[in-house]
Image (spheres, grey):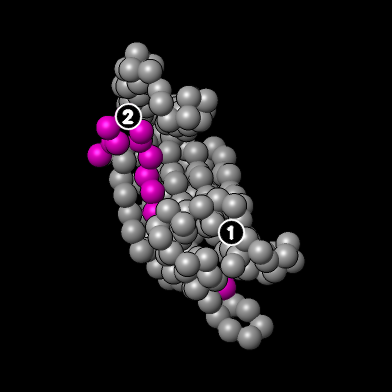
């Protein structure tokens, strides 16, 4: 059983996911710097990455009714390694997605667009499950990484929603759920307003350039 493993054994089990995060974070950094150089615009505000703790992995496997084994971790848990990318504008989200999709060594397993199709509670984000090759001394492994891409405003809302549900142990009063839905609509309006302002500025810049 994995809960009986030593800390050293857990480190060996999860080390592969650290390598995957190192790899994808390097790719994101390169893509961001190249895009900034070519387009005079930085699409990424900040990037966070994390590896699930052993207790969280064990609980997720148990909820799925799966045996605690390295095979099941690798094949049935998609978010052991996770990356969250925050952008200024909604259009940047899809630019980053297209840039990642063009990478020859990234295989996209699944895409969930919660921006065009928000969750009932108002949650919005763009999710990807990818596989990326990790070249070890003895073998090459394809490792899954979950990537979430959202605006700064969406990220703020999601962080607040998570804290509230954690505080109330998922039993959130109806009036607070209603307030969260209203806040989500406000965030959506702000995002599209800021996108509109950005587009206006680009049009003005283009007109001045062509004078």
Residue at x 63% of width, y 79% of height: 136
- Which type of secondary structure does the marked residue at label 2 adopt? loop
Residue lying at the far bottom of the rendered structure? 138
User: Which of these two is toward me, 46 or 30?
Assistant: 46
Disc 1 designates what residue? 21
Drawn side of residue 133 relative to residue 54, left or right:
left
Measured from the top left, where is residue 148 in percent x and y?
44, 46
- Which type of secondary structure does the marked residue at label 1 adopt? helix
Drawn side of residue 95 relative to residue 25, left or right:
left
Measured from the top left, where is residue 190 in percent x and y?
37, 21
User: Which of these two is toward me, 30 or 203?
Assistant: 30
Quadrant assignment for the C terminus: top left
User: Which of these two is toward me, 78 or 64?
Assistant: 64
Relative vertical location of residue 53 with respect to residue 22 in this rendering, above or below: above
Q: Residues within 10 Å of mark 1 (few under 14, many from 20)?
A: many
- Magenta-tinted stretch: 117-134
- Can residue 200 be seen from the camera position used here? no
Disc 2 designates what residue? 122
Relative vertical location of residue 138 with respect to residue 204 in this rendering, above or below: below
* Residue 58 among magenta residues: no
Residue at x 32% of width, y 29% of height: 122
Tags 1 and 2 touching, CB below 8 Å: no
Drawn side of residue 177 relative to residue 68, left or right:
left
Residue 151 sits in quarter: top left
Residue lying at the far left of the rendered structure? 117
- Can residue 1 be seen from the camera position used here? yes
Residue 101 sits in quarter: bottom left
């Amino acid at each position: 059983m994995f809960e009986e493993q030593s800390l050293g054994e857990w480190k060996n089990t999860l080390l592969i996911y650290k390598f995957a995060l190192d790899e994808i974070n390097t790719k994101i950094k390169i893509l961001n710097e190249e895009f900034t150089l070519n387009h005079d615009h930085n699409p990424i505000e900040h990037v966070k990455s994390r590896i699930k703790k052993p207790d969280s992995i064990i609980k997720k496997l148990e909820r799925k009714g799966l045996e605690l084994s390295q095979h099941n971790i690798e094949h049935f848990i998609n978010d052991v390694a996770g990356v969250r990318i925050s952008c200024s504008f909604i259009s940047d989200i899809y630019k980053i997605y297209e840039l990642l999709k063009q990478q020859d060594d990234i295989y996209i397993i699944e895409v969930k667009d919660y921006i065009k199709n928000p969750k009932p509670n108002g949650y919005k984000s763009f999710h990807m499950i990818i596989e990326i090759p990790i070249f070890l001394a003895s073998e090459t492994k394809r490792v899954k990484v979950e990537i979430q891409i959202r605006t700064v405003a969406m990220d703020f809302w999601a962080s607040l929603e998570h804290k509230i549900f954690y505080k109330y142990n998922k039993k959130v009063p109806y009036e607070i759920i209603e307030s969260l839905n209203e806040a989500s609509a406000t965030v959506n309006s702000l995002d599209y307003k800021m996108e509109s302002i950005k587009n206006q500025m680009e049009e003005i810049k283009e007109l001045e350039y062509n004078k």
